[in-house]
Amino acid sequence: MVHPVSLIISFYNKIDLLLFVFAALERQTFRDFEVVIADDGSKPEIVQEINRIRSNYSFPIKHVWHEDNGWQKNKSLNEAIVASEGEYLVFIDGDCIPHPKFLQEHFENRAENRVISGRRVFLTEKISKSLTLKRIQNGYLDFQVAFPLLMDTIFHSKKTELENMIRIRNKILRKLFIKEKIRNVIGCNFSAWKKDILKINGFDERYRYPGFGEDCDLDERLRRTGVFPCSKKHLITEYHFFHKHFDTLYEPNMLLWNEKKLNYETYTVYGIIKGSENEKKETEVKR
């Protein structure tokens, strides 16, 4: 059975967080989806555990893995795109827990020549440590987490972006307050038509450092083809598990991004299909 939506999850070793994501996916109001794990080289024991548990869930799970050779998130994402069967792709990170209406809102708001970009709420370290599978299954993140997040925001000056937790469900109010704004893609919460991503040959695999470039580059190249990111703040929500910031080298990514911007690049020859844009026509990609 081919599902219209493929949810692609960036993943590396953190199986405990992946189980939280799966628990949240069991609560989704939209059910016609598959999961594709874009695994950037997790340990063999983690791969074995995923294979053991993948049949425990009500949704199909594919696991795409390559050997660990440093940070190659874009490569793993491209491999997951090829493995996906849905015509519409939703992207999250393995430390982001989706709201129950997350997939429904992404799917219902899809539109031609648009990338849908949601927003995230940052969980504090204290709240992240208090999370359990049972809490997620019982809907703790839907309502109960709001008060402790508010307290951490006010009294401990924590960055939570708590306002993103507000979801406007009334259709009339949505039209009034949720405007279609062109805003940057957030790599851990966006969706797009598969055909649009294939048209630009997916993610550029030369970005080898986290923190900047991999999603900005995709965003810019899509815009150059007439596909623009549309923000759905207060509508498409996820909860970002606490972790310390990556130590990263921004300069190589920044130099590459500026070079591509100067050249007005749309199609990358370092993406899903390796080689020139003419060679892409001679190569079949699973669609």
Image: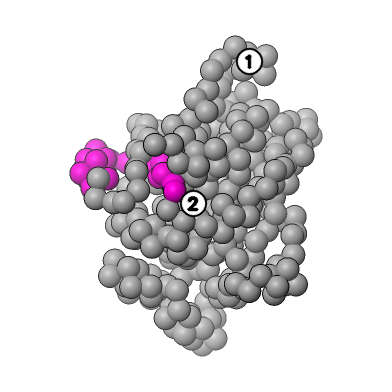
What label sits on residue 125 in the rendered view? Answer: none
| Numbered marks: total | 2
Q: Considering depth in this image, is 35 or 270 the residue closer to the camera?
A: 35
Residue 71 placed where, x, y %?
45, 40
What label sits on residue 92 in the rendered view? Answer: 2
| Residue at screen point 35% across, 58% down | 26
Q: Is residue 47 magenta?
A: yes
Residue 169 placed where, x, y %?
60, 72
Q: Is residue 147 magenta?
A: no
Residue 243 placed where, x, y %?
43, 62
Three-letter amino acid code of the residue under disc 1? Lys
| Residue at screen point 42% across, 72% down | 141
Quarter assignment of residue 154: bottom right
Residue 107 placed where, x, y %?
56, 52
**Is 283 drawn above or below residue 254 in the view shown?**
above
| Residue at screen point 73% across, 46% down | 228
**Is 29 drawn above or below residue 171 in the view shown?**
above
| Residue at screen point 72% across, 42% down | 113
What label sits on residue 281 in the rendered view? Answer: 1
Quarter assignment of residue 143: bottom left
Three-letter amino acid code of the residue under disc 2? Ile
Image quadrant occupied by the N terminus: top left
| Residue 220 in view | no
> Magenta span covers which residues?
32-54
Q: Considering depth in this image, is 155 or 189 the residue closer to the camera?
A: 189
> Looking at the image, what colour scheme do you see?
one colour
Upstream in the sequence, badge 1 or badge 2? 2
Real-space CA distance between mark 1 and mark 2, rounded to the nearest whole angstrom? 30 Å
- The local secondary structure at tag 2 comes to strand
- The local secondary structure at tag 1 comes to loop
| Residue 23 in view | yes
